[in-house]
Image (cartoon, grey):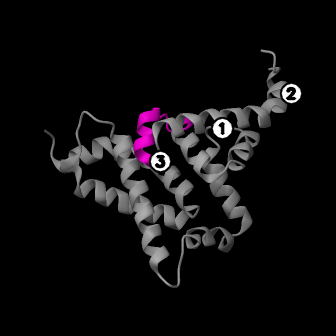
């Protein structure tokens, strides 16, 4: 078996861009996303001997990230001064153009402006599940494990989200691509 450093470099460093995108989705703040990614990388490196090389490295890394995010939320929610919304306060501190640029950067390689707007209109839990499915290509079972949501709920959420996106993007499909409802 490879040593700890080589295994980490081979398995987890290639995930950096995707993991930073997921961290940005969770935190809605560039600084918090960078911190969350860094914490996740440190924890993954520290616990790499627990990683099963036959399992999905991306799912393992994303699960660590999600758990760290939730633990930080719980810690902040117990504090008398801060709460979960502190993560979201950075949105308001940033200039609007900076926030738009960060959100656009996260989706620009994958979707058009219209699709990005339709995705950002989804509620938070459905967006997270759908991004893990459509952008990060996780199978349903791994999404359920990462999010700690039952498999049936994951399937329903993705199906409902597809339907919502279909409705909101139907005009774009007809106008830009000649795809009609009857096809």
Side of 112 where 172 appears, left or right: right
Describe the element under mark 3 as helix, strand or loop. helix
Describe the element under mark 2 as helix, strand or loop. helix
Real-space CA distance between mark 3 and mark 2, rounded to the nearest whole angstrom: 33 Å
Residue 118's spot in the image, x, y percent? 73, 43
Describe the element under mark 1 as helix, strand or loop. helix
Real-space CA distance between mark 1 and mark 3, rounded to the nearest whole angstrom: 25 Å
Side of 132 where 3 appears, left or right: left
Residue shown at the point (34%, 45%) measured from the top left: 60
Residue 104's spot in the image, x, y percent? 67, 50
Closest to the camera, between mark 3 and mark 2, is 2
N-term-proximal mark, 3 vs 2: 3
Q: Residue at label 3?
A: 17
Q: Which of the two residues, 66 or 104, is positioned nearer the viewer here?
A: 66
On whether residue 139 falls in the magenta region, the answer is yes
Quadrant where the N terminus sits is: top left
Residue 84's spot in the image, x, y percent? 54, 70
Mark 2 closeness class: few <14, some 14–19, many ≥20 residues within 10 Å: few
Rendered position, 118 above or below 86: above
Closest to the camera, between mark 1 and mark 3, is 1
Q: Magenta part of the protein: which range? A: 133-148
Quadrant where the C terminus sits is: top right
Residue 64's spot in the image, x, y percent? 36, 53
Q: Residue at label 1?
A: 161
Q: Which residue reaches farthest bottom? A: 80
User: Is the magenta region chiefly helix, strand or loop?
Assistant: helix
N-term-proximal mark, 1 vs 2: 1
Residue shown at the point (67%, 61%) measured from the top left: 99
Q: Residue at label 2?
A: 175
Mark 1 closeness class: few <14, some 14–19, many ≥20 residues within 10 Å: some
Side of 75 where 126 appears, left or right: right
């Amino acid at each position: 078996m490879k040593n700890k450093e080589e295994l980490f470099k081979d398995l987890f460093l290639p995930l950096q861009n995707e993991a930073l995108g997921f961290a940005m989705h969770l935190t809605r703040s560039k600084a918090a996303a960078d911190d969350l990614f860094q914490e996740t990388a440190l924890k993954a490196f520290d616990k790499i001997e627990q990683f099963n090389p036959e399992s999905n490295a991306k799912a393992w890394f994303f699960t660590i990230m999600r758990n760290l995010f939730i633990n930080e939320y719980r810690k902040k929610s117990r504090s008398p001064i801060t709460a979960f919304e502190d993560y979201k306060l950075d949105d308001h501190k940033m200039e609007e153009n900076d926030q738009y640029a960060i959100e656009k950067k996260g989706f620009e390689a994958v979707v058009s402006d219209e699709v990005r707007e339709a995705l950002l209109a989804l509620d938070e839990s459905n967006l997270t599940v759908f991004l893990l499915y459509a952008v990060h290509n996780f199978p349903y079972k791994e999404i359920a494990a990462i999010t700690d949501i039952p498999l049936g709920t994951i399937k329903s959420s993705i199906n409902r989200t597809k339907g919502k996106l279909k409705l909101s993007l139907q005009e774009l499909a007809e106008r830009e691509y000649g795809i009609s409802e009857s096809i």
